[in-house]
Image: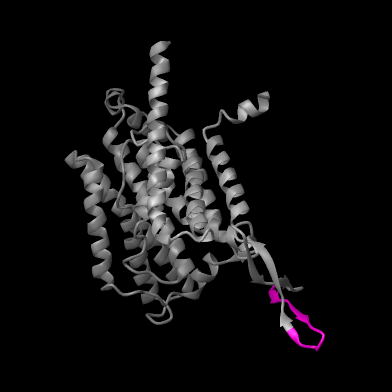
Amino acid sequence: MPPQLRQLFRFQESGLLLVILVLGVLLTAFAGTVRTPKFERTADGARQRVFTTDSGGNRNPAFEEKNKFLNSQNLAQLAKDTSFIAIMAVGMAIVIISGGIDLSVGSTYALASVLGAMVLHHFGPEGTALAPLAACALGVLVCLATGALCGLANGSLIVALGVHPFIITLGSMAILRGIAFVATKGQSIGGFPADLREFVRFEMGNGLSVVPLLVMVLVTALGWIYLSRLAAGRRVYAIGGNEQAARFSGIRVGRVKLGVYVLAGLAAGVSAVLSLGYYGAATSGDGQGYELNVIAAAVVGGCSLTGGRGSALGVVLGALIIQMIASGIVILGIDQNYSQIIIGAVVIAAVVLDNVNTWLAKRRLTRA
């Protein structure tokens, strides 16, 4: 093997990139084609429908054949869907690296969405008059604050009671979802200032939503800096690797755990902001089942459920793999009811592979 190629495979994320490449090739090969309307760009950059003229002088809409997977619209949709999950997965990765788990991430996302929506609706076109930018800023602040407070509540209970994070976050998952339902009475909330929607839905090319993609890149970069370049991130790895040893070395374990759950909640709040801007409404049922997708992205991305291992870039690639699988199910015409089965199987396979790798590493150390 050439030295350059050997160096590439030393990176933790190289295997994930290979999986993404293989999935992309398989989906492109087996997806088939779809007939779509043909558009062209005008001089001012607007998209305009293309028409053809037949022998009788009639104008007919033009169509073109595109690969169901490898086309600009599907790839733009894939990037947008990945960004919502990937942002929360970065926060989840920090929690899992510390040796914890957060099952309430979907409920945190839902509560942040509905409370932010209530504020935006109250100060929107149908409510109390307020400058649109001020209303948008207040709604964004409520989303972020709600996410951070939910994470703070989870972390405080885990540290104060000494109960396993699984139990605490399982309970808070139901509590937060219930609060969201009571606050909205099960109704959808819309009527936001147009500025937020116009900003988040800003598109380039053939429907590529730039803002969610840029926020995902920013959150990933911040997560990478936190975990790889800051002392706080080193403490997270230390606690996940051996909590007792970390405590004896002088690390304030409780404070670090509190911080990682706040970051996870904050990440859910960021996704809630993007969701409000993109969809223009929120309900208490938003984020249902996101727990599985976010944890799956983290585990597939290389985070060990025993703690002490993982990276921000890895979980983003893991989120992309999960979304490619979900997109592939639709493109290949597989019954949607199988999607959760397939994603669950992928999570189990990733955990099994992680355990095998851990066992092999220990065996090598024992032999040495």
Q: Quadrant of residue 79?
A: bottom right
Q: Is residue 48 magenta?
A: yes
The spot of residue 189 in percent (x, y) is: 36, 74
Pick whichever, 56 or 3, lies toward us: 56
Q: Residue at x 27, y 23 (%)?
A: 248
Pick whichever, 55 or 353, lies toward us: 55
The spot of residue 316 in percent (x, y) is: 49, 46
The magenta-colored residue range is 46-59
Q: Is residue 243 visible?
A: yes
Q: Quadrant of residue 109?
A: bottom left
Q: Is residue 180 magenta?
A: no
* Name of the residue lying farthest toward the left: 161
Question: In this picture, is 70 found above or below 136?
Answer: above
* Name of the residue lying farthest toward the right: 55
Pick whichever, 201 or 36, lies toward us: 36
Q: Residue at x 47, y 74 (%)?
A: 132
Q: Quadrant of residue 158?
A: top left
Q: Quadrant of the C terminus?
A: top left
Q: Residue at x 35, y 33 (%)?
A: 307
Task: Please give left or right for residue 181 compared with residue 357 in the image.
Answer: left
Question: In this picture, is 11 found above or below 192?
Answer: above
The spot of residue 31 in percent (x, y) is: 59, 57
- Total numbered circles: 0
Q: Colour mode? A: one colour
Q: Quadrant of the N terminus?
A: top right
The spot of residue 271 in percent (x, y) is: 43, 57
Question: In this picture, is 277 found above or below 24?
Answer: below
Q: Is residue 205 visible?
A: no
* Name of the residue lying farthest toward the top: 368
